[in-house]
Amino acid sequence: MPDGTDTRGGAGAAGRNLLFLREEELRLAQDLLFFGYRDFTAGPDAILAEIGLGRAHHRVLHFLGRRPGLTVGELLSILAITKQSLSRVLTPLMAQGYVAQSTGRADRRQRHLSLTPEGEALERRLFERQRETVTRAYREAGPVAVEGFRHVMRGLMGPEARRALDRLGMADRPSVRAVPPQAPLQGKTP
Amino acid sequence: MPDGTDTRGGAGAAGRNLLFLREEELRLAQDLLFFGYRDFTAGPDAILAEIGLGRAHHRVLHFLGRRPGLTVGELLSILAITKQSLSRVLTPLMAQGYVAQSTGRADRRQRHLSLTPEGEALERRLFERQRETVTRAYREAGPVAVEGFRHVMRGLMGPEARRALDRLGMADRPSVRAVPPQAPLQGKTP
DNA sequence: ATGATTGCGTCAATGAAGCTGACCCAACCA
DNA sequence: TGGTTGGGTCAGCTTCATTGACGCAATCAT
């Protein structure tokens, strides 16, 4: 993998002088993020277009798939959009039976959102499409690169996004609190 | 930095089994790309909003800054949008004196686009803002991670984007043929 | 030289996804 | 009881993309 230097920035470019990021290095990063993100979303976008939905709907499906039971307010703060923007996306999703609402037990003002079976099926379809893209990229790049990718992407985020990410990642099965990295055979949950 | 394993996927997660990308790994990738890209663009977006421009304008400024003399058609194929979408962005940029046009010498149907001094200044301002974000991320992550980041991002792209990226990156000083930026002294033509 | 194609510009209409400010209701809390 | 919070909604606006059609000038091929 030390040969894997066709990233065009050149092998040593990254190792040079990180305190002053050279112009070409930044321009490359801009290009990579633009093209990469665009093509990353292209697959799901195409599927969504067929059924009259868009990327914003996908995001809702994604985060609800990740954390069923999110309240409206929590979802708003993750997406960092306005209530009205979310509404325009959420209303059709509920009307078409992809998302269900339930009144909070502890606080009956809250609405907990979750995917219906249809919602789960759609989310999975989008998920599988994206899995192809990401799996290919990960496989081409190798484990070390993947680790680096994660590290850099995380670094691009502001503090709020990092916190949101951490909250999302922990407690999928709220057993350990805080990040079970692998838990492959920890007796706990499959 | 070798300890830098707080990427939350866990240190060894990436090294496990890349042929079958586990669900959690992909969900993490989705999160990272969503939050990372959003915050990556947030800085320039804020500057642009002040002067009544948007992200689409930034993209044009960026690619013209990278490759002055691009023709309209080349820019279209890089951005992968329609002529009309580009027009809505390009017309104001020219009207406000950020971008200049010049008729192609070799082929007079073509319009070569480039930044005016004002355009360069604006592009640089946006650039510097983004430099802060990326420099911070790169510095936190370290050179190896950066190399990995580039590798993965490139892997996310489809073939067309890769080709566009390669064309962009080479020949900053056009010693190598490939896109005569201006065709400055081709004696031809009246 | 004629005719087709190419490069660019522009018309009109549409849609997705965000924004603002205002206002309402039900529920919670002090 | 009265203020705050969580959620929903109305009206109107902006950005960025889409489509299809058409025009014009320049180039290329026959």
Image (cartoon, coloured by chain):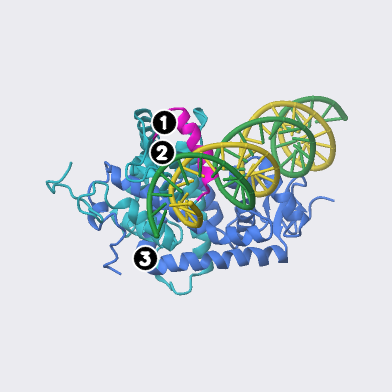
Chain colours: A cyan, B blue, C green, D yellow
User: Nearer the N terminus, badge 2 or badge 1?
Assistant: 2
* Spatial CA span between label 2 and label 3: 31 Å
Identify which amino acid the numbered label 1 is placed on: Tyr
Pinpoint residue A36: horizontal percent, then vertical percent. 47, 49
Q: Is residue A100 magenta?
A: yes
Pinpoint residue B71: horizontal percent, then vertical percent. 68, 49
- Left or right: where C9 falls relative to A51: right
Query: Which residue lies at the image location 48% right of the left edge and 44% below the top edge?
Result: A39
Disc 2 chain ID: A
Q: Please tell me the numbered disc located at residue A25.
A: none
Identify which amino acid the numbered label 2 is placed on: Leu
CB contact under 8 Å: marks 2 and 1: yes
The range drawn in magenta is: A81-101
Image quarter where the C terminus of chain A lies is top left
**Which residue is situated farthest in the left direction here?**
A187
Identify which amino acid the numbered label 3 is placed on: Ala
Quick one: SS at disc 1?
loop
Quick one: SS at disc 2?
helix
Q: Mark 2 points at which residue?
A: A61
Residue A122, quarter of picture: top left
Q: How crowded is mark 2: few (under 14 residues within 10 Å), some or many (20 or more)?
A: many
Q: Does the magenta stretch include residue B118?
A: no
Q: Name the residue under label 1.
A: A98
CB contact under 8 Å: marks 3 and 1: no
Q: Name the residue under label 3.
A: B141
Query: Which residue lies at the image location 49% right of the left edge and 41% below the top edge?
Result: A56
Q: Does residue A4 show up?
A: no
Question: Are labels 3 and 1 on one chain?
Answer: no
